[in-house]
Amino acid sequence: MKLIYNLGILLYYAIVYIVSFFDDKAKKFIEGRKNVFSFLAERIVYNDKFIWMHVSSLGEFEQGRPIIEAIRREHPEYKIILTFFSPSGYEVRKNYDGAEIVCYLPMDTSWNAKRFVRLVNPSIAIFIKYEFWGNYLSELKKNKVPTYIVSAIFRDNQVFFRPYGGWYRSFLYNFEHLFVQDEKSRNLLASVGIKNVSIVGDTRFDRVLAIAKASKELPIVAAFKANNRVLVAGSSWPKDEAFLLPYFNEHSNMKLIIAPHEIHESHIEDIVSKLKRPYVRYSKTTPEEAAKADCLIIDCFGLLSSIYRYGEVAYVGGGFGVGIHNILEAAVYGMPVVFGPNYHKFREAVEMVKVGGAFPVNDGNDFSRVMDDLMEVDSDSFQRASAEARQFVSNNCGATDAVLKAVFKESSK
């Protein structure tokens, strides 16, 4: 099985290498790994104490970030090395100043794992959520490096819990401790003999709370909002906009802020073509002009988490595609959240629906029904949903502190 695994890693790399001649993301995946070891050798100083955190992409980085920042505050004796698997994470956060070193993770071959662990010589290793690399985990165990996985979720269809998954289950025994999000994950691990497990929840709750506390004042958005009720549509896709925009056009009692997931010009123009009420684009307006508009189109990145605070209700896109985007950035402000039907693999969405802080919709008719209820002035439904959303985030904060207390207590033994 180990031979098949290693051949699979090499085959994956070979396929990405071939695709890299035609695809920019694949090219970055290959090019970014070419000089990782020389990059590390130039930056690692003998006797430095490193904590190594590995994340897959941008979403996992946001889960790891509260831990990194807490380590920097509470344990400044350590330096941080942050590795990414995916270009979509690395390219966005390669200049992140919370870590001394940011780079790609070399492919999980036995040779790369030995060389990487020997060179970095981490005091502690932390993997986030779904990252299970057999050779790296084995090498860390051989070198007696305390290794943890944080914000992990396990499902019964994963290979670890299959009758043929014995060799893959051995990966799990390399962790000093597994910090999981829910009871189901702990029970699944217990069913295969893994008992060094704690339920601490998801560190993303700590992250969105920190973002909310540091949210920016946005004069254009504030002027647009004024005393109006506002729907904020975050990370919208065309399938979401197909019913969002008609509803907005027909309801003059509300304003709309729309932040499309893709902001290329053709998408913006498509949105504009469907609007029947006055609009402005964020990058091309002033507070005075925005105050007179009914729709504010966000045509730049990096503002959405601060924009949510100006709305009453949030619609989060992606639920008519592969899955919804981040709903916690809105919920932290006590906003009821509406989204499409593909949300069941997101624990926070499932739980928010249960408590009444979030509302899945299957089509435009569902959306109209939910919005008519939530956007009504002094709506009892809105007040209840808002309170539940805020309370849900508050109840789930604290995972970062729990992880750090456990990790540094164990690592000091």
Image (cartoon, rainbow, N blue to C red):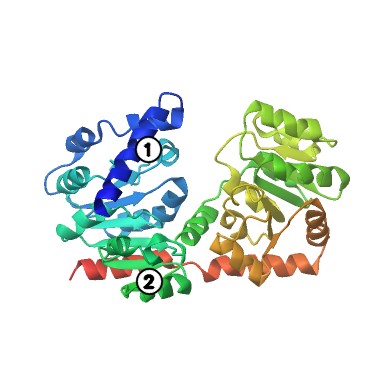
Q: Mark 1: which amino acid?
A: Lys
> Could you tell me how many numbered marks the image carries?
2
**Residue hosting label 2:** 189
Residue 241 versus residue 205: which sits nearer the camera?
A: 241
Q: Image point 29% across, 40% down: which residue?
A: 10
Q: In which quarter of the image is the C terminus?
A: bottom left
Query: Residue 327's spot in the image, x, y percent?
Result: 60, 55
Q: In this view, does 8 lie above or below 309?
A: above
Query: Residue 242's spot in the image, x, y percent?
Result: 76, 42
Query: Residue 288's spot in the image, x, y percent?
Result: 75, 34
Q: Is residue 403 above or below residue 13?
A: below
Residue 17 versus residue 329: which sits nearer the camera?
A: 17
Q: In this view, does 294 lie above or below 404?
A: above
Q: Image point 69% across, 61% down: which residue?
A: 336
Q: Which of marks 1 and 2 is in front?
A: 2
Query: Residue 113's spot in the image, x, y percent?
Result: 21, 47
Callout 2: few (<14), some (14-19), or many (20+) C-alpha neighbours within 10 Å?
many
Q: Is mark 2 on a helix, strand or loop?
A: helix
Judge whether residue 44 can be spotted in this image. Answer: yes
Q: Image point 35% across, 63% down: which residue?
A: 164
| Labels 1 and 2: the sequence-earlier one | 1
Q: Residue 25 carries which label?
A: none
Q: Do the residues labelled 1 and 2 touch (CB within 8 Å)?
A: no
**Residue hosting label 1:** 94
Residue 166 versus residue 310: which sits nearer the camera?
A: 166
Q: Is residue 26 above or below residue 113?
A: above
Judge whether residue 102 can be spotted in this image. Answer: no
Q: In which quarter of the image is the N terminus?
A: bottom left
Q: Image point 66% across, 37% down: which residue?
A: 298
Q: How far apart are marks 1 and 2 (CA)?
A: 34 Å
